[in-house]
Image (spheres, coloured by chain):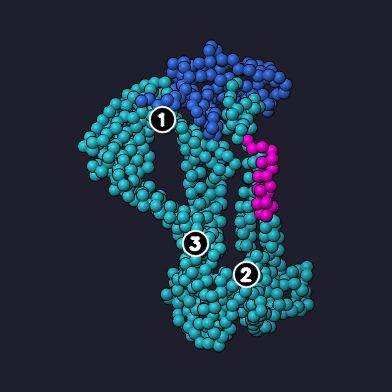
Amino acid sequence: MSMSIDLRGEPIFRPGDQLMGAVRWALDKDAKRLDINLFWFTDGKGTRDVGVVESMTVERPTRLGEKSFVFRLPAAPLSFSGRLITLTWAVEAIAHGTDEVAMAEFRLSRDGQEIRLRHDAPA
Amino acid sequence: MAIDASNSSQNASGCSRVGISIFFSFFLIMGLVFCVVIGIAFWENLETWFWQKTPCTILESRHSVDASSDEPYSAQIVYQYTFDDLTHTSDTITPEATSTDNYRRIQRLLLAFPSGSERFCYVNGEKPGVAYLKRGQLWMGLFIFLPLIFVAVGAGGIIGTWRRTPPKALTAATKPVTASASNGCGPRVGLFAGLFLTLIGVILFYFLGMGVVVNLSTASGWHEVPCRVLHSQLLTHRGDDSTTYSVDIFYRYQVGDITYHSNSYGFMGGSSSGTKGKRKILAAYPSGSEALCYVNPADPVEAVLDRGFHPLYLLSFLPLLLVLVGVLVLGKSFRTATAPTPPAFQRGDVQAMVLKPKQGPLPRVAGTFFIMAFWNGIVSVFLWQVIDGFRRGDPEWFLTIFLIPFVLIGIFLVGLFLRAVLCLFNPVPQVRLDPGKVSLGGTALLQWRVRGRVSRIARLTITLEGHEEAVYTVGTNTHTDTDVFYSQMLAEIADWREMLQGKCPLTIPHDTMHSFAAKHNKIIWSIKVKGDIPRWPDVDEAFEIEVTP
């Protein structure tokens, strides 16, 4: 019983890029449906916020299967890391009716670098 | 997946959870006990609505007075009815007790069921010897909502204590992160709670406060009628941990051909500690004396000896506090429920725009005034009691000491309000940004203008600031933490002539974060304008700007 997500290429993307990948699963019981979500979520001191940007659904998936996906990435919000908040992008697959969940994180960045909020105020 | 699990420290330990659960269990159990008590009483009253309506003859109708009781008045109504060819005699009037310390209820019963009249009673078909003249009241079932508040607080507290967010690494492994993507039940719970509080406040105000308000507003039109004081006494109400007193002046008056009785002194009943003031009132209305009472021409059963206003009547407005809180919760929840998701950012320039301050001076004055008036309005009722106690030479020391922190907060709120009023006379900064939105690494032209007596400002600073803002919940409290990650002084001016207007370029670093606004987490960029005014509240305005990716 397993489920995994493979993203094509390095997990660093720019706004407007196409995010391509595939979900592979081997379930020990039938799932009602399988959702693949493109989303961001926050971590840190604040209560978690989650924004689902795009989703695709596989109705009544077979127990053993694979589904490729292509998502167009939006302009924002960019991945960043601060003292209170960290914002992360990910693709998540959920097999409803089973306990199977898989997630693959990636960075949405304009120049490939992660935004780290500086706390050294300029003079 | 590498998700930070640092928040696990927020989880309460097992011991503290048990302690908190015991604390909330008290609320839950007390609420449930009262729910059961009210539920049983409601059910018994409801049953009488299915009893058989049967003609009856009122044989006797009079009141009785037991001066030794703290509820001295009761109605004695004897009636006869025939059920299944058997004649029964009864003197039970309602399922509720008829003894009372407010004679008005007795008077209404005697007028509704005079001796010799033919009326209907309600007979228990299974026990024909049991009957009531009036069926049980059902509205009292509404009071079940009051203990339900305790049940909700208790149950919510216990559930909240044990349903803390588990460490996030665990969350990610076992539960879809997107399961919390919707607004969740938060706004719905808020809407329900707001509606619930508003409803309770309205019901309580209707039953406890509306009568006082209506009577006060019509009191000047009540008729002055001579009355005779039949007895005058101080009623003692012994509670579990305190004894309170009330004035009981029983008097008789006539309107048309009908003789009425009443024991209402003013528009508000109830009892309190302290006897000096009450004895003074009783001395003015000794037994057997003639006096004047004021009778409501629309309902002569309603009469009082004193139709003036007393500050204690303000207590009638207390239920409106619940209404206010309910409406505020409703409004906040509605805004949250309908809050749009973070807008999609548009690249490209936007026309120049005049920025709006985060909070203008007038809303600040209105806000502080409202809070100050609300707080001090309530505190003043009790403060008046304290002052009156000292004036009468019978100070209420416990209330005096208890009130000190509340008065200090009231004084602080007055200070805040005065400060906000003084700020109305401050010079007002205006800020214009061209273009109106700035992209990461982009530059805009910031223009400012300061209106008013700018010469009072000793030093003006304009700063570009970016900060994180995170809202989180610990137990039942919501906290907001902020952290400034970028601060750059754009202008620092000491000459007031240069403060009047000016401009400077504003550049957003390319390696920082754009504006971001989710429900609990935000990245906020703003222009802060501060002006030091000697011996006066400073100019301190923030203008939020939008930084796009």
Instruction: Name the mark nearer the viewer: 2 or 1.
Output: 2
**Camera-side residue of B35 and B424:** B424
- For the residues bearing labels 2 and 1, Cβ distance under 8 angstroms: no
Q: Which chain is blue?
A: A
> Few, some or many C-alpha atoms within 10 Å of disc 3 (few <14, some 14-19, many ≥20)?
some
Is residue B272 at all visible to an observer of this figure? Answer: yes
Magenta range is B11-32
Residue B415 magenta: no
Disc 1 to disc 3, how far (Cα)? Answer: 44 Å
Residue sitting farthest toward the left: B497
Mark 2 chain: B
Disc 2 to disc 1, how far (Cα)? Answer: 60 Å
Residue shown at 52%/68% (left/top)? B395
Q: Is residue B124 above or below residue A2?
A: below
Residue corresponding to mark 1: B466
Q: Which chain is cyan?
A: B
Q: Amino acid at mark 3?
A: Phe
Mark 3 chain: B
Residue corresponding to mark 2: B243
In the picture, measured across the screen, residue B245 lies left or right of residue B88, that is: left
Coordinates of residue B186 in the picture (x, y in percent): 56, 40
Instruction: Name the mark nearer the viewer: 1 or 3.
Output: 1
Q: Are marks 1 and 3 on the same chain?
A: yes
**Image quarter hosting the C terminus of chain A:** top left
Query: Which of pointers 2 and 1 lies earlier in the amino acid sequence?
Result: 2
Residue corresponding to mark 3: B317
Name the element at disc 3. helix
Mark 1 chain: B
Secondary structure mostly seen in the magenta stretch: helix
Q: Amino acid at mark 2?
A: Thr
